[in-house]
Image: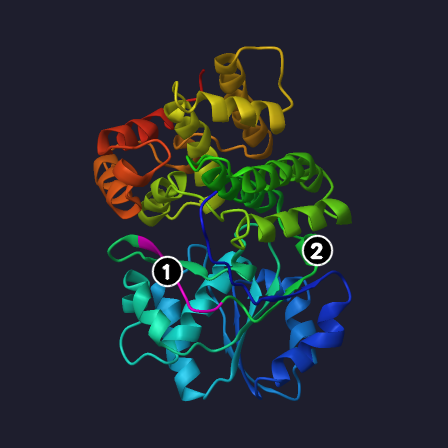
Amino acid sequence: MLDFTFHNQTDIRFGRGHIDNELYDVLHQYGTNVLLVYGGHSLKQTGLYDRVLGLLKDLNVTELPGIEPNPKISSIREGQKLAKDHQIDVILAVGGGSVIDAAKVIASAAYYKGDPWDLVISPAKRQDLAQLPVVDILTLAATGSEMNFGSVISDPTIPQKKGTQGPNSPAVSFLDPTLTYTVPTRQTAAGASDIFSHLCEQYFDTAENNDVSKSMIEGLMRTVIKWAPIAVKEPENYDARANLMWAATMALNGIVGLGTVNHWTVHPLEHELSAQYDITHGIGLAILTPRWMKFALNEESKPLFARFARAVWDQYGYDDMELAENSIRRTHDWLKSLNSEMTLPDVGITDDSKFADMAKAAVAGGSLDTNAYVPVTEQDAIQIYRDSMHDFAE
């Protein structure tokens, strides 16, 4: 197991009773000027918008609505201006990972004199800046942004989609599973696919004897496999929603990725898809993951895929290669049971004209040819995209 340093100070408030009883005091400790960041109309339709504003009636609230999935740099620029103009003390992000991602970058941009895109393409600059405290109310189990340092921001005019790391994770995160009851089936499935992909990216790694991380990931994978279909079929099943929400947080708060060696692969490939086509991130991951697994299976990776088959999919009685192949098929079939869109044409991508440029950007941005679990060249990446144009086959 490799050496590591771990630090995360996010205060988690999990369950039904915390928001009404604690939100005001949590925010007020930082000051009276609050920037409320949120997404679309669903927040108002569910009543959460009015509920939150009612709790903040004695505070000075400035609103930044309209944060989109795959959050755009234009929203960050608007948030930077609002934070400066209104002398914001704390940011309250109410929504899913995209809203929280945006809030974290705005929190840095509030102290930056230049264009906030600089902080996306050069994350090191954020480490020298102060950062406004971010408090969030999570409404979608998926990205884990509620307890990590990362954000992914897009500039559709280039187009580029980049990850950036800040100096702080959110100060306080309110995780109430009941707030996810109204999440549409498609987004619930995409969120579960995102969680599973985060776990896969950290599991398929060449670090030796890292059994603590591997075993935790296997348990989280089994949890997502069990509860995601239930959440899709029974949207108001509290245990299903609670397990997915906590699994999403645990999948990407840094703990299970300690002591790993390799860079992620499927996320860089998907970021190019959603940068070019603005598709739903979790669905892109669901499409690409089994195709990448098929590419990555070889004699050297076979033992880990076989372990994956035994520990996650409860598969026994075959040789290692058969187990490995079964695990990939089981992964695909489970993802397909959640997601109706499992090929690129299903999400409107019907030609390969952009694949070469996407592959070049993904390989360079993710160091996939040198630091991936199984090295991926530009030609390999193009082939993974092409394989994703068709129904999955063994």
In this view, the mark in front (1 or 2): 1
Q: Position of residue 153 (x, y in %)?
A: 37, 59
In depth, the one of 112 and 252 nearer the eye is: 252
Q: Residues within 10 Å of mark 1 (few under 14, many from 20)?
A: some
Is residue 141 visible in the rendered image? The answer is no
Residue 393 picture quarter: top left
Is 89 on the left or on the right of 138, as rendered? left
Q: As drawn, which residue projects farthest toward the top? A: 318
Which span of residues is magenta-colored?
A: 161-168
Please tell me whether residue 382 belongs to the stretch shown in magenta.
no
In the rendering, which numbered label is found on residue 164?
Answer: 1
Q: Position of residue 124 (x, y in %)?
A: 31, 66
In the rendering, which numbered label is found on residue 177?
Answer: 2
Q: Main secondary structure of the magenta part?
A: strand
- Identify which amino acid the numbered label 1 is placed on: Thr
Quadrant position of the C terminus in the picture: top left
In the rendering, which numbered label is found on residue 340?
Answer: none
Residue 371 picture quarter: top left
